[in-house]
Image (cartoon, helix red, strand yellow):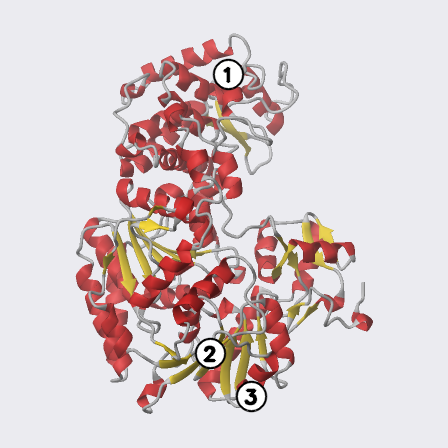
């Protein structure tokens, strides 16, 4: 019988229910160190990550931790724990040691953040209202519970480990190589710490998983390489071009694809792909990314998209090209029935070659401090990031977002592609007055003369209103009734309901008041009716813009920012079928009865008014978008809502970062002012009432919450409070669920203001 290890990292009962498996702590530390070193080698920080791996669980050598582990798991029920009421602290020991070994240098704090946070997350240095700061945790021996004599024991163990490990003596105690360039830069030091943190926590998760659930570990990393994907892409495009009709739009798409392939050889950095809507940018951007990745040894391709409503569309295209198991689709609204165990594992750390995700998932991960979220970050290193519909980057977060992109390109081997028909003005100075800041270096435009394709692929004629004259909803409704197939896009959910009420029966209503399951079903119905030439009229909020692949002959758009007008126009004559008949699609801009809500929507509308005043028609060109975005950004009051400079840059000389506080405030979707409600909806394939019943009986199982995500509607906080106070919703295990039958109506969605409620159908 093998002798049990002197120190144990993890304990698991065998399948026989009698014997135990013990994870040797020294083996765990060395394996984590080796993995972390391998991960961090991609940004020249392997020795730092190795040291973090060796020291991260030093506190588990303490007698009280070993006793706690044995008693907690039942391996030794008689284990005696001295002086602790609960779980002994094990992550502070290595953090304190790092301060000692670096002799008080701020560099010691770099590892201290990483080691101390490897379970609870990256902490703030200084205390805030929530507490949990690293400063007090490290220097107040009472708060971090390292008792007298224990630190001496940890020091001795660390020295012993170094002696036993002949392969890595350079890391003890001050043998780390010079810091990488990112460490020397005040602006990007926080990003380097996050990357180091990611290497440690992913290595820790993976080594623990290999011991605890080896069946999961065996399913990781079994993917074809980008070279194989490139071959599949070539075969797919060859067949697609062979089957394409000899239309002008297909000729232009083929030219754009050829240019993207040729430009892929250019040196890594920032690129823009400015292609008019319908120009095939989904496939052309992937062509560039694949060839660029192969030439420069990039590890993966990450496409980030602003809306979950178009992620499924892009992922479906890529699955058709590369195969069902080749693409990781990672976002909050993912259809759980399309997931498998392998993809759920891959979503934890993005170790697949092609990832399709949201802007929210990408950027909130880059600024998060949570271990489960951050473990994917090191797999962003040395990748190609495609930012689809780049104009949707949130202005109030633009300073930290552009900074992190600049840092990824400059120090972490990333190439970034801004991919859109409506390119935002992100280089040089951005904004005006006190809000002005330095943007990105100029991006290399992949299409040398994008104006050429905007002219060649012109598919619509846009008529403009008298800017000073408003149209009543009745007038707009009467106009729309004249068309067999028409789409009208408005600015708010209320506008959508108000106009829809005036339309003939059968008109489709589409807004964010509907759950994701119903929206997906409705978009499928719209596409089918359009393809069949059936009569169809749709009143929608802007959720159909920016990439949803629908093609109407007539589109009406309430006055908004020029980018929004252009995106709505992209839903008109998208495939150029009307051009073949010698005519263009019709886009009509009108001034709605009420201006857009105060805030960014209003600023966009005002910027558009100043440019479009006294014009009778609108020609969409790259130069117009550049003028519009400069004017729009000049009106923005704050590009740094979560206080990036204050919390992550100004404290660099003392390595004093406020990681946790910044992460709490960096919310691209601000849940402080809205809440999600799980609604009752019986879809074609799923019924939320059945899932809610399971939630009521069994509680919030992860697989169940993924399914319920498809049935959530987010509402403003005042609306939520009104529904809660009226007893129309109830709290089930921390999740708010519809309680009244009449609250959600298929075809209209959640009816928050009571105007459309039928009191007789409210059943509790």
- The residue positioned 45% from the left and 35% from the top of the image is 646
Name the residue beneath numbered marker 2.
465
Res 392 visible: yes
Marks 1 & 3, CB-CB < 8 Å contact: no
Residue 517 picture quarter: bottom right
User: Quick check: 217 above or below 747?
Assistant: above
The earlier-in-sequence mark between 2 and 3 is 2
Kindly report the distance in space between the C-alpha atoms of the residues bearing marks 1 and 3: 72 Å
In the drawing, what numbered circle is on residue 380?
A: none
132 or 595: which is nearer to us? 595
User: Quick check: 597 above or below 177?
Assistant: below
Mark 3 crowd level (few <14, some 14–19, many ≥20, 10 Å Cα) = some
The earlier-in-sequence mark between 1 and 2 is 1
Instruction: Report x, y in % for residue 516.
Output: 56, 65
Mark 2 crowd level (few <14, some 14–19, many ≥20, 10 Å Cα) = some
- The residue positioned 26% from the left and 56% from the top of the image is 271
User: Quick check: 111 above or below 615?
Assistant: above
Name the residue beneath numbered marker 3.
481
Marks 2 & 3, CB-CB < 8 Å contact: no
338 or 15: which is nearer to us? 338
Classify residue 362 as left or right of residue 539.
left
Q: Secondary structure at mark 2?
A: loop
Q: Secondary structure at mark 1?
A: helix
The earlier-in-sequence mark between 1 and 3 is 1
Name the residue beneath numbered marker 1.
139
């Amino acid at each position: 019988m093998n002798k049990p290890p002197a120190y144990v990292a993890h304990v698991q009962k065998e399948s026989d229910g009698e014997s135990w498996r013990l994870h040797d702590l020294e083996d765990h530390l060395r394996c984590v160190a080796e993995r972390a070193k391998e991960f961090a080698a991609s940004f020249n920080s392997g020795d730092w990550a190795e040291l973090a791996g060796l020291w991260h669980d030093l506190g588990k050598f303490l007698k009280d931790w070993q006793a706690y582990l044995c008693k907690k798991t039942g391996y030794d029920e008689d284990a005696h724990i001295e002086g602790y009421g609960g779980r002994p602290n094990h992550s502070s020991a290595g953090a304190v040691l790092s301060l000692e070994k670096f002799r008080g240098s701020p560099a010691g704090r770099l590892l201290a953040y990483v080691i101390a946070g490897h379970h609870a997350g990256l902490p703030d240095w200084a205390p805030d209202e929530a507490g949990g700061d690293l400063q007090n945790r490290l220097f107040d021996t009472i708060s971090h519970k390292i008792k007298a004599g224990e630190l001496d024991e940890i020091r001795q163990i660390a020295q012993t480990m170094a002696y036993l490990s002949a392969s890595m003596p350079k890391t003890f105690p001050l043998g780390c190589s010079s810091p990488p360039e990112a460490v020397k830069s005040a602006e990007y030091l926080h990003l380097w710490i996050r990357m180091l943190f990611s290497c440690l926590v992913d290595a820790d998760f993976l080594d623990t998983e290999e011991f605890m659930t080896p069946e999961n570990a065996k399913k990781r990393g079994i993917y074809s390489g980008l070279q194989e994907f490139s071959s599949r892409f070539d075969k797919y495009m060859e067949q697609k071009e062979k089957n394409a009709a000899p239309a002008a739009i297909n000729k232009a798409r083929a030219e754009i694809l050829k240019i993207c392939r040729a430009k892929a050889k250019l040196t890594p950095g920032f690129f823009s792909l400015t292609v008019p809507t319908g120009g095939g940018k989904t496939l052309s951007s992937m062509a560039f990314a694949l060839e660029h990745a192969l030439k420069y040894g990039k590890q993966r391709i990450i496409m980030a998209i602003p809306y979950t409503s178009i992620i499924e569309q892009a992922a479906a295209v890529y699955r058709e090209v590369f195969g069902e198991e080749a693409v990781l689709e990672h976002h909050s609204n993912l259809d759980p029935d399309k997931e498998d165990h392998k993809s759920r594992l891959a979503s934890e750390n993005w170790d697949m070659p092609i990832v399709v995700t949201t802007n929210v998932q990408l950027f909130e991960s880059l600024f998060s401090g949570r271990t489960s979220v951050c473990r994917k970050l090191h797999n962003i290193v040395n990748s190609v990031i495609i930012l689809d519909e780049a104009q949707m980057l949130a202005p109030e977060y633009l300073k930290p977002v552009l900074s992190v992109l600049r840092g990824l390109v400059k120090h972490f081997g990333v190439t970034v592609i801004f991919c859109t028909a409506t390119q935002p003005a992100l280089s040089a100075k951005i904004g005006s007055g006190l809000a002005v800041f330095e943007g990105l270096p100029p991006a290399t435009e992949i299409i040398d003369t994008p104006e050429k394709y905007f002219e060649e692929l012109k598919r619509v004629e846009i008529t403009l209103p008298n800017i000073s004259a408003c149209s009543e909803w009745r007038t707009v409704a009467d106009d729309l009734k004249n068309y067999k197939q028409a789409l009208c896009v408005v600015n708010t959910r209320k506008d959508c309901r108000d106009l829809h009420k005036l339309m003939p029966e059968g008109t489709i209503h589409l807004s964010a008041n509907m759950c994701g399951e119903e929206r997906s079903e409705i978009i499928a119905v719209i596409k089918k009716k359009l393809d069949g030439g059936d009569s169809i009229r749709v009143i929608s909020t802007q959720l159909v813009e920016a990439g949803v692949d629908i093609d109407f002959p007539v589109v009406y758009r309430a006055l908004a920012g020029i980018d929004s007008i252009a995106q709505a126009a992209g839903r008109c004559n998208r495939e150029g079928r009307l051009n073949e008949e010698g005519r263009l699609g019709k886009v009509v801009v009108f001034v709605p009865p009420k201006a857009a809500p105060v805030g960014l929507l209003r600023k966009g509308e005002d910027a558009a008014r100043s440019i479009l005043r006294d014009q009778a028609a609108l020609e969409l060109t790259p130069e117009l978008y550049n003028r519009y975005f400069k004017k729009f950004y000049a009106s923005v009051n704050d590009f740094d809502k979560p206080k990036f400079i204050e919390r992550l840059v100004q404290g660099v000389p003392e390595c004093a970062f406020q990681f946790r506080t910044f992460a709490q405030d960096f919310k691209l979707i601000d849940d402080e002012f809205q809440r999600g409600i799980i609604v009752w909806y019986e879809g074609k394939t799923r019924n939320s009432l059945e899932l809610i019943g399971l939630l009521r009986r069994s509680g919030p199982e992860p697989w169940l919450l993924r399914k319920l995500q498809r049935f959530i509607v987010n509402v403003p906080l005042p609306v939520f409070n009104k529904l809660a106070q009226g007893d129309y919703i109830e709290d089930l295990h921390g999740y708010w669920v519809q309680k009244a039958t009449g609250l959600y109506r298929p075809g209209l969605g959640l009816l928050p203001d009571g105007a459309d409620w039928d009191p007789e159908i409210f059943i509790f």
